[in-house]
Structures are given as structure tokens and as C-alpha cells.
Amino acid sequence: MKYIVSLNGKDYEVEVEKGEAILVDVRDTPVAAPVAAPAPVAAAPAAAPAAAPAPAAVTAVAGTKVEAPLPGAVIEVKVSQGQAVKEGDVLFVVEAMKMANDITAPCAGTIAQVAASKGQQLNKGDLLAVIS
């Protein structure tokens, strides 16, 4: 997959393939904005791909937010709503850069909301859970 990454006000093209190392070619020349390819003439209409499911709506819940400290994928959810937790209990396991990272409770309380699910891709700062 190709991505356009902005760094210090400049856009760079990044190409990532599953199972390969991520290489970034940073040059002084900014990447031009992508241009859509012209539609083929007299082509039969193709079936539209199935839309990806929308992420569950996250409603505001009062309490201590537990956020993703790094980008990755949720490989295990160890808590459920209503569960009592102690400070330091493992709430989630997130895989990042082929390493499993335990996400722990920053405080004791009750899980008021679980906002992440197994298999979900995360960005740094994404809400995982709320402890009240």
C-alpha cells in the first residue's frame, strides 16, 4: 500500500507491503498530490467492494481514560464493562512492531466503557477504555 506522510510541512510517499520492513524515502522534493486514473472507456461496471464496517460509536463516559500509548493492533481484550480492576492490572494486549505490549490500568476502579475490540487497528491516543 502507498501512503502520503506529512513531515515538517512536506509530503512524502511511503510504500508498505505486508510482511516486509517499512522503508521511508525522504527527499527534499515534496510528492505531488495523487491524481485519479481516468476511467476506462466502454468498460463493464464492476461490483462495488463491500464497505468496511464503521467503528462503534464512542460516547463520552466520565472517568479515567485509558488511551493507546502507541500505534498497533489489539490482540487481546482482558476486561469487560462493569469489571473491577486494580492499578496495574492488564487491560489489553497490543501488538506493535511484532511485540506484545501490555496496557495496564492507571488506577483502581470499575471498567465503565470498553472502546476497543480484538483485531482493531489503533493510532496513538485512541481510546481503549474508561475506568470510573
Image: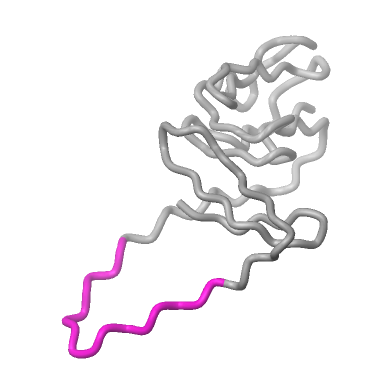
Is 41 included in the stretch rendered in magenta?
yes
Name of the residue lying farthest toward the front = 28
Picture quarter containing residue 101?
top right
Q: How many labels does the image show?
A: 0
Q: Is residue 86 above or below residue 30?
A: above
- Say left or right for 89 vs 1: right
Q: Which of 63 and 69 is in front in this view?
A: 69
Figure check: 49 above or below 124: below
Give left or right: position of 122 versus 110.
left
18 up-or-down from 47: above or below: above
Quarter of image, res 73:
top right
Q: Which of 110 and 126 lies nearest the eye of the viewer?
A: 126
Of residues 67 and 85, the one nearer the viewer is 67
The residue at 64%/35% (across/down) is 71
Which quadrant would the C terminus be assigned to in this image? top right
Tell me residue 98's x, y (percent): 53, 21
Residue 97: x and y in percent read 58, 26
At x 81% / y 19%, what residue is drawn?
106
Please tell me which residue is depicted at 82% across the width and 30% down the height of the picture.
64
Span colored in magenta = 34-49
**Quarter location, residue 110:** top right
Q: Who's the residue at 64% across and 24% down the image?
A: 82
Q: Does the magenta stretch include residue 66?
A: no
- Magenta-drawn stretch, dominant element (helix, strand or loop): loop
Colouring rule applied to residues: one colour
